[in-house]
Amino acid sequence: MQCSVYIATSTDGYIARKDGSIDWLHNAGNSQADMGNNADMGFADYISSVDCLIMGRKCMEMIASMDLTAEQWPYGDTRIIVLSNTLKLPASNLQDKVEMYSGDLTTLVALLESEGHQHAYIDGGTTIQSFLNLKLINEITITRAPVILGEGIALFGKTSADIKLVEASAVAFANDFVQVNYKVSY
């Protein structure tokens, strides 16, 4: 099963402020830019390519705090699995949208594959790091926002070995965001 990452960071590589806030993401860049057909910077195409999403608990809590309406929900009918060793139930406003999982990640991927899933979207800093260390990520797309935070929660943390990224491609958007896509070569 293919596992990929699609995530935004500050230019200096942070996915959130130290308190988990992503307010900077909504204020970064040129909001007056004509984005043409790229208003979502490829997210709709990406989400239509996945059939399940695996995210960490903190990621779920951030999404829950947004209290999105049905019209704002970005994931459509995609199956969402939330990883947590502490929570047994999802946030109350997400109970009909996500399911909880506690256990081995390799087992989870094998289970999803046996159920017919072919492409998992991996989201959340700790979750991404865990999947990378298990050599389960095949592709990474990072959209860098034109803002330097100076500190926060880094996308990448300690890895068990160097991880080589290959076949780079990049696109600069009119709003000053830059998106880079890599294949992962273990």
Image (cartoon, rainbow, N blue to C red):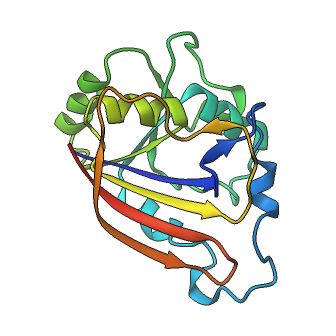
Q: Indicate the quadrant where residue 40 lies.
A: bottom right
Please give the name of the residue rendered at 56% of the width and 9% of the height, measured from the top-left corner. Answer: 86
Left or right: residue 99 compared with residue 154: left
Residue 71 lies, in percent from the top left, at 69, 60
Residue 84 lies, in percent from the top left, at 51, 18
* 46 is higher (above) or lower (below) than 86: below
| Quadrant in the picture for the N terminus | top left
Residue situated in front as seen by the camera: 117 or 70: 117
Left or right: residue 9 compared with residue 17: left
Residue situated in front as seen by the camera: 43 or 184: 184
* 13 is higher (above) or lower (below) than 59: below
Residue situated in front as seen by the camera: 88 or 128: 128
| Quadrant in the picture for the C terminus | top left
Please give the name of the residue rendered at 61% of the width and 53% of the height, measured from the top-left corner. Answer: 9
Q: Indicate the quadrant where residue 46 lies.
A: bottom left
Q: Is residue 98 visible?
A: no
* 89 is higher (above) or lower (below) than 154: above
Residue situated in front as seen by the camera: 21 or 59: 21
